Amino acid sequence: MSGGGSPFSPRAVLALLVLGAAAFLAVLFLIGTGADAPDEKDGGGHAAGNGLNGYAAFSELLGRRGYQVSAIRNAARLDDPSLLILTPPPYADADELNRVIERHRNLGPVILILPKWFALPVGARPNLKSKKGWVVLFGATSPAWGDKIGRDKLMRLRLDQPQGKQKPPPVGWSGLGFAGKLPDPSAVQWVDSSEFEPLVRTAEHKDLVSFWDDGGYYPRLSAAAGVDPYDRDEASDKWPLVVIAEPDLVNNYGLADKDRALLALSIVEASLEGAHMPVAFDLTFNGLGQNDNLLTLAFRPPFLAATLCFLIAALVVAWRAFRRFGPPAGAGGPRMGRRQLAAGGVDEAAAMATFAFGKRELATNGAALIQRAKRLHLLGAPYAALVRNRIAQALGLRPGADIALTEGAIDALLERRGLQPNFASQAEALRQARGPHELLRRAHALREIERNLSR
């Protein structure tokens, strides 16, 4: 390799920078998108579940109908104003569930969908072909926390499971202007409570969907249930709690039917009570919660402005680093290789002499820094003191003596040797100098005096 040539071409340096930046951005992307997040297609009964017991179809249906739909993976977002749809599993914590419901009812309505089915991933049965997340339903049970919602024994759950080998007859339902049949009559879950007003019932008056009539002002829900609403001035200011006891009305299993899909939309519309707000499906109770990482927070207010400033600064630094990468250019311009030097008739040793190595390089860089910082005018006094101390040491004068006495002694010595006694005047002129040319001229004058005395 030539001593005067660059070991890297601009293309190689650019390729290294691009590849490094791409790898860094890929790492940031994986961090921001949650590459280590739990698998959402786990066969669970939640808004990301694509099995029979999941609610992915419900979420997609609302999105296609113009609702702003999101999935909550961070518990802090449970306090955002929205229609909150909770799909807790059978093993959820009743106390925590009640806290979330009561807190959110100050911000927006809550729809609580109760679980019912036991589900087994189809992948566990090798004789069946399926997609990831599909399940097989093999039994039903009511959640243990069902009777603890609101207060103990407020919402009494019932689960009808006909016994016998014969297939049970279809179970019909009606409400909110629609009617139809449940997809599976083998297990029907309903609420048996006088404090809940029915919205959807079976022919036997079993409440499949109802809302808690707790003294709030819910005109649309009351009209759908056929009851008079409370006086607005005397009613509480809480949003409604709607309970869907029979999940087959709104889960993926149920939304295969048009009437049940229209019913699901009507339940959401009635729960909103005419308000316009987003719809949020909770995933935290289903074990799919995640905390916001630092990268996500960096691109949200109020940190977004600082992040943009940092990115702009990083781009400027990267561009300057790229432009300055490689060996330094000599005084005569960019470095040249042996062939270029020979072709130009330039001696290689002479070209290498343009580089400052060791102490000289350190002094050159220091001088460049001082000049760039516009502090050149501060060098006069230190340089005058440096020359004065060197001469005093050479003459055997006491170090640290008074400046005027020392400079007077130097002038006296100059006069005895027949030289012009101008050290004190030149030193003072150097201390007062401001421009670079005057500084150099006065410094050279002191240096010349030092040389004359050393002869």
Image (cartoon, rainbow, N blue to C red):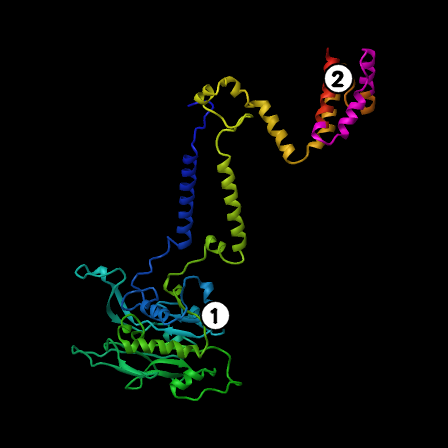
Residue 37: percent from left, percent from top: 37, 55
* Place of residue 196 in the rendered image (x, y in percent of width and height, measured from the top left): 39, 82
Q: Secondary structure at mark 1?
A: loop
The residues bearing labels 1 and 2 have C-alpha atoms spaced at a distance of: 84 Å
- Three-letter code for the amino acid on which mark 2 is drawn: Ile
- Precedes in sequence: disc 1 or disc 2: 1
Residue at position x 62%, y 26% from top?
Answer: 363
Q: Looking at the rendering, in which quadrant would you find the N terminus? A: top left
Q: Quadrant of the C terminus?
A: top right
Which residue shows up at 73% across the image and 32% down it?
434
Disc 2 target residue: 449
Local SS, label 2: helix
With 304 as the anchor, is 377 left or right in this view?
Answer: right
Question: Is 245 in the magenta?
Answer: no
Could you classify mark 2 by the number of other residues whose Cα lies within 10 Å: few (under 14), some (14-19), or many (20 or more)? many
Q: Which residue is mark 1?
A: 81
> On screen, 295 above or below 191?
above
Q: Main secondary structure of the magenta part?
A: helix
Residue 84: image quadrant is bottom left
Return the residue nearer the eye: 378 or 260: 378
The three-letter code of the residue at mark 1 reads: Pro
* Range of residues picked out in magenta: 408-437
Report if residue 151 is visible in the image. Answer: no
Is 446 on the left or on the right of 73, as rendered? right
